[in-house]
Image (cartoon, helix red, strand yellow):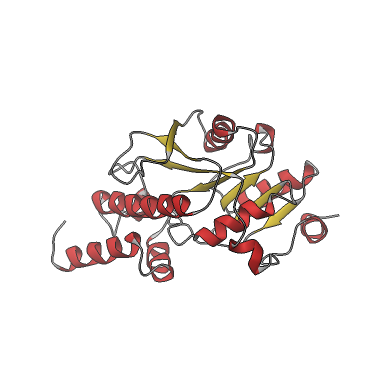
């Protein structure tokens, strides 16, 4: 049986959750965002050019602030950020900071789950999907009441969300990251472990200039969209 057939049998259909699941129930899972401190030259380097390193870092900071605000607005057990670097004004006071550990992204993801796990399911997201909503995060938490895992695929072939009822580093370590097949490999890892997996809608995370424009249109009232407009104005005025 190939991966697609197994997914048809073992994975909940995308978008199958009811409206009630999407937002009305209190979420009992813990939430964690994994992110880097938005330092020019160290984050979102694929945005340069056309954006300068400073502009790319400002976009990353805005996206992270939007994501964290959404997390704060979502009912949850505990809210944390697994952070590489130092905190800044984008960090809400109610969010606990835990340092990232490990070398590759697969190890850092596995450690992030381990660092925040307190006996409740854990939902992890990245800091570069500013269009995410409290309803989507609540849907992820609700899914973990009836599934072992919840998975949010990204448009570039990766994933923007991973939730586990009982985290296990063996589910993540060794998954090749930042490749077009990362999401498929990660999903297969979950299925091969015999887990039941609920699927969330596909989202676009911000990695390329084309992603910037698309995501800004998806969330026109966000800090991220405002930062994109500001960067465009400065470029038009010749301000670097």
Q: Which residue is at a point 47% across and 51% down the rendered structure image?
A: 71
Asked whether, in this view, residue 23 is left or right of residue 59, the answer is: right
Asked whether, in this view, residue 157 is left or right of residue 96, the answer is: right
The C terminus sits in image quarter: bottom left
**Occupied quadrant, residue 112:** top right
Residue 142 at x, y percent in the picture: 66, 54
Foreground residue among 52 and 144:
144
Q: Which residue is at a point 13% across and 63% down the rendered structure image?
A: 238
Residue 155 is at least partly visible in this image:
no
Foreground residue among 138 and 216:
138
Count of labels in the image: 0
Q: Which residue is at a point 73% across and 52% down the rendered structure image?
A: 197
Residue 27 is at least partly visible in this image:
yes
The N terminus sits in image quarter: bottom right
Foreground residue among 164 and 94:
94
Residue 235 at x, y percent in the picture: 19, 64
Seen as rendered, the residue at the extreme right is 1
Residue 219 at x, y percent in the picture: 41, 67
Residue 179 at x, y percent in the picture: 56, 49
Above or below 206: residue 78:
above
């Amino acid at each position: 049986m190939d991966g697609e057939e197994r997914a048809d049998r073992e994975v909940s259909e995308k978008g199958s959750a009811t409206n009630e699941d999407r937002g009305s129930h209190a979420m009992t899972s813990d939430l964690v965002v994994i992110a880097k401190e938005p330092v020019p030259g160290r984050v979102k380097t694929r945005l340069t050019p056309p954006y300068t390193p400073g502009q790319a870092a400002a976009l990353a900071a805005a996206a992270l602030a939007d994501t964290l605000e959404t997390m704060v607005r979502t009912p949850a057990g505990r809210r944390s950020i697994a952070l590489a670097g130092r905190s800044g004004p984008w960090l809400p006071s109610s969010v606990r900071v835990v340092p990232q550990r490990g070398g590759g992204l697969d190890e850092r993801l596995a450690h992030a789950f381990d660092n925040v796990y307190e006996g409740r399911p854990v939902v992890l997201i990245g800091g570069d999907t500013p269009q995410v909503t409290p309803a989507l995060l609540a849907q992820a938490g609700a899914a973990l009441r009836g599934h072992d895992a919840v998975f949010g695929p990204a448009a570039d072939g990766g994933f923007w969300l991973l939730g586990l009822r009982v985290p296990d580093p063996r589910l993540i370590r060794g998954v090749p990251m930042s490749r077009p097949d990362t999401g498929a490999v990660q999903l297969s890892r979950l299925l091969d472990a015999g887990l039941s997996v609920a699927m969330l809608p596909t989202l676009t995370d911000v990695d390329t200039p084309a992603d910037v424009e698309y995501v800004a249109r998806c969330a026109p009232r966000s800090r991220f969209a405002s930062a994109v407009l500001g960067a465009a104005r400065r470029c038009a005025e010749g301000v670097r």
